[in-house]
């Protein structure tokens, strides 16, 4: 067997609700070696399979499928399939692990965790300038961060560079000036801080100043040193999918299968992180709502969010005040999209999302407490 992890199949669970009762799961399998033997194994397991967008979509009882793969293709094929399918089904059926940070444990196995947004920028799409005014820097942002904690945030996400569609990059010096004093003071007050950055140096200095997580919207693509830096720092890392860069990402994004493509990207990138020395137990995944996606793509990602839980990592969702919500409801002002944002947060939790990146912290807490209670009843 080829032991290179990047040659292993990727399994995405579309539905496994019947598995505990001995029933079939619906699985989408990609990067399949020996695909025709696997299709034969599905038939031998009395399942059905069909090809869709380069993926083998299989409906079969997972344990029977693995046994049948052994009969059709020998031990090696059975092992390959078992290693991909069994953890994915278990993860879909179960809860994600907790997230251990240097500032304490985030209870992602238990309940939705609220990440309050603190943009220390002049140009963020909904709160640009609200927490960043040179004359009152950094006190103004620190006060806002403490208020988010008071309001019930588990984590405060401090960012110094807008990633709204069309945003221009900010240079490293300016980003450091915006975020480092805020992070230092907030973490000094016992706040669990995450830093929203794509730059290795900013990530390193932020963690040295007390940040407990790194939230990177670029999946390491904008700074070749970032993944090695994350491995070295040993802090949790939010791995997000984005198509292109903030400046270019909304120029006619196209996918044949948005959920499949985003999922496979995250699966590949998880392996890449592991190869770079990052502990997979420290990674949060995020489908990147609004980052190189149309309204329809965003809605489909949210509707099928549960499929992402089969990667076995806590899922973060950032829908708060975003433009796709306004496109649906007709509300043009991001600051007036609270109802839309709360609805989306509740749907994300119902779909297995365990970290919510939001502007309206106390309201989101209340909304998702209901969604979580219903989901776990
Ligand atoms: N969205 C934004 C910024 N960072 N990080 C993650 N992990 N997921 C997201 O969906 C996400 C994110 C964009 O929102 P905001 O920070 O409010 O605006 P801006 O980028 O304009 O500062």
Image (cartoon, grey):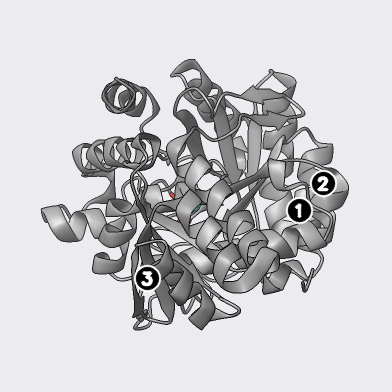
Which residue is at a point 56% across and 33% down the rendered structure image? 156
In the foreground, 346 or 350:
350
Q: How far across and how far down the image is residue 63, in percent?
A: 49, 49
Q: Position of residue 117 (x, y in %)?
A: 48, 39
Residue at the image position 54 percent from the left and 29 percent from the top: 108
Residue 71 quadrant: bottom right
First in sequence, mark 1 or 3: give its number: 1
Residue at 25% in and 66% down? 295
Q: Which residue is mark 2?
A: 205
- On the image, which quarter does residue 140 sit in? top right
Residues tagged 2 and 3 counted as in contact (Cβ below 8 A)? no
114 or 68: nearer the eye?
68
- Circle nearer the viewer, 1 or 3: 3
Residue lying furthest right: 232
Sort mark 2 into few (<14), some (14-19) or many (20+) by Cα contacts within 10 Å: some
Disc 1 versus disc 3: distance between alpha carbons? 31 Å
Quarter of the figure that contains the N terminus = bottom right
Q: Position of residue 151 (x, y in %)?
A: 43, 19
Query: In this picture, is 245 found above or below 163?
Result: below
Is disc 2 in contact with disc 1, using a CB cutoff of under 8 Å? yes
Label 1, on which residue? 202
């Amino acid at each position: 067997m080829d032991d290179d992890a990047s040659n292993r199949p990727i399994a995405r669970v579309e539905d496994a609700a019947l598995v505990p009762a001995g029933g079939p799961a619906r699985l989408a399998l990609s990067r399949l070696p020996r695909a025709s033997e696997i299709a034969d194994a599905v038939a031998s397991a009395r399942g059905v399979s069909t090809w869709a967008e380069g993926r083998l979509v299989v409906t079969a009882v997972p344990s029977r499928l693995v046994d049948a793969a052994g009969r059709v293709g020998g031990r090696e094929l059975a092992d390959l399939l078992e290693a991909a399918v069994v953890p994915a089904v278990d993860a879909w059926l179960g809860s994600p692990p907790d997230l251990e940070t240097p500032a304490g444990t985030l209870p992602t196995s238990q309940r939705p965790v609220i990440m309050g947004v603190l943009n220390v920028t002049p140009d963020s799409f909904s709160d640009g300038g609200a927490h960043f005014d040179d004359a009152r820097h950094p006190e103004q942002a620190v006060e806002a961060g403490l208020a988010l904690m008071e309001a019930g945030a588990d984590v405060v996400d401090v960012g110094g560079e807008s990633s709204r569609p069309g945003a221009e990059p900010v240079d490293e010096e300016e980003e450091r000036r915006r975020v480092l004093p805020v992070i230092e003071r907030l973490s000094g007050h016992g706040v669990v801080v995450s830093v929203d950055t794509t730059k290795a140096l900013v990530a390193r200095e932020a963690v040295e100043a007390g940040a407990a997580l790194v939230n990177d919207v670029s999946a390491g693509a904008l700074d070749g040193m970032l993944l090695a830096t994350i491995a070295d720092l040993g802090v949790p890392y939010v791995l997000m999918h984005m198509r292109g860069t903030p400046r270019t990402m909304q120029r006619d994004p196209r996918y044949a299968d948005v959920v499949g493509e985003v999922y496979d990207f995250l699966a590949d990138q998880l392996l890449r992180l592991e190869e770079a020395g990052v502990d997979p137990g420290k990674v949060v995944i995020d489908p990147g709502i609004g980052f190189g996606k149309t309204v329809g793509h965003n809605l489909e990602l949210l509707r099928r969010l549960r499929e992402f839980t089969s990667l076995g990592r806590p899922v973060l969702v950032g829908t708060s005040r975003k433009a796709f919500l306004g496109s649906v409801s007709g509300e043009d002002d991001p600051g007036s999209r609270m109802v839309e944002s709360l609805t989306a947060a509740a749907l994300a939790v119902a779909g297995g999302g365990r970290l919510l990146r939001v502007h309206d912290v106390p309201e989101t807490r209340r909304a998702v407490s209901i969604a979580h209670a219903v989901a776990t009843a």
